[in-house]
Amino acid sequence: MKGPPFAPPKLASIIVEALEDRVHPAYGQAATVGSRGRPQARTVHWRWLPERGTLGFNAHVRSPKWRQLRRVPELSGVYHDATRLIQLRWEASVELVDFKAKASGDRAMLDRAWALMRPEVRLAYWRDWAAAKTRDVAPRCPNLGLAVCRPRVWDVFVLHPKDYNKGRRTIYELKSGVWRSSKVSLLHSRPV
């Protein structure tokens, strides 16, 4: 992994556990900047990318979100984990990895992402590829891409199971390669 860790150490293990949970998949939202400069949000399946030591999601290389991220490689993400009683929001730069990837680690990362997709989703990717009539969804389709996120801000809300007012909110910001934290109000970003 190059650069600073994707999250503060105390937070990183919780995030990895949530993103690798096969029983409770990590569906959340990603917001990009549309062609008219307006935010565009959509639901994505957030995954842990061990090859890069960070999080990301699959994307079709001809999708609007892929075009938007190519133009402005930045996003805001959110994931509410009802199992672990935590809400994660973050801001990140994004690197796009697609079928042109030269590094063997990137190709392995794409292969792993493909293998983790449900068969019916893989079939949809293949059917879109030059109107392919294939039923074999094992080989990776060339139109699969990965959005690899490098968070620089985490806004973490740890919920209390019985009393919202006992929840805790912390903002972590990456400054000069070091994660700095500040406790803030549940309702706004002022320090508490």
Image (cartoon, rainbow, N blue to C red):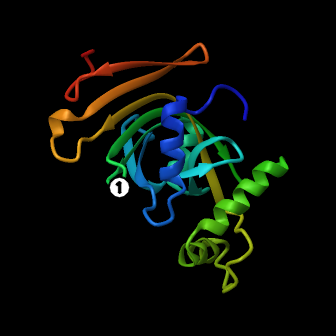
Q: Residue at position x 34%, y 43% from top?
A: 86
In which image quadrant can residue 5 be found?
top right
Location of residue 117 in the rendering, given as x and y in whole percent from the top left corner: 58, 68
Give left or right: position of 133 versus 118: right
x, y percent for residue 37: 40, 34
Residues packed near mark 1 inside 10 Å, few (<14), some (14 to 19) or many (20 plus): few
Taking the image as shown, residue 133 lies to the left or right of residue 107, namely: left
User: Which amino acid type is shown beneath numbered disc 1?
Assistant: Thr
- Residue 169 point in image, percent of width and height: 30, 29
Front residue of 43 and 86:
86
Name the one closer to the observer, 97 or 117: 117
Quadrant (top left, top right, bottom left, bottom right) of the N terminus? top right
Give the SS element for disc 1. Answer: loop
In this view, the residue in front, 67 or 97, is 97
Q: Is residue 74 left or right of residue 116?
A: left
**Residue 124 appears in which quarter of the rendering?**
bottom right
- Visible residue check, residue 46: no
Front in this rendered view, residue 131 or 145: 145
Visible residue check, residue 87: yes
Report the quarter where the C terminus lies: top left
Rendered position, 58 above or below 189: below
For the point 35% across and 55% down, which residue is it? 83
| Residue 163 placement (x, y as % from top left) | 15, 41
Mark 1 — residue?
A: 83
Q: Residue at x 43, y 34 (%)?
A: 90
Residue at 67% from the left image edge and 79% from the top image edge: 137
Q: Is residue 27 above or below residue 124?
A: above
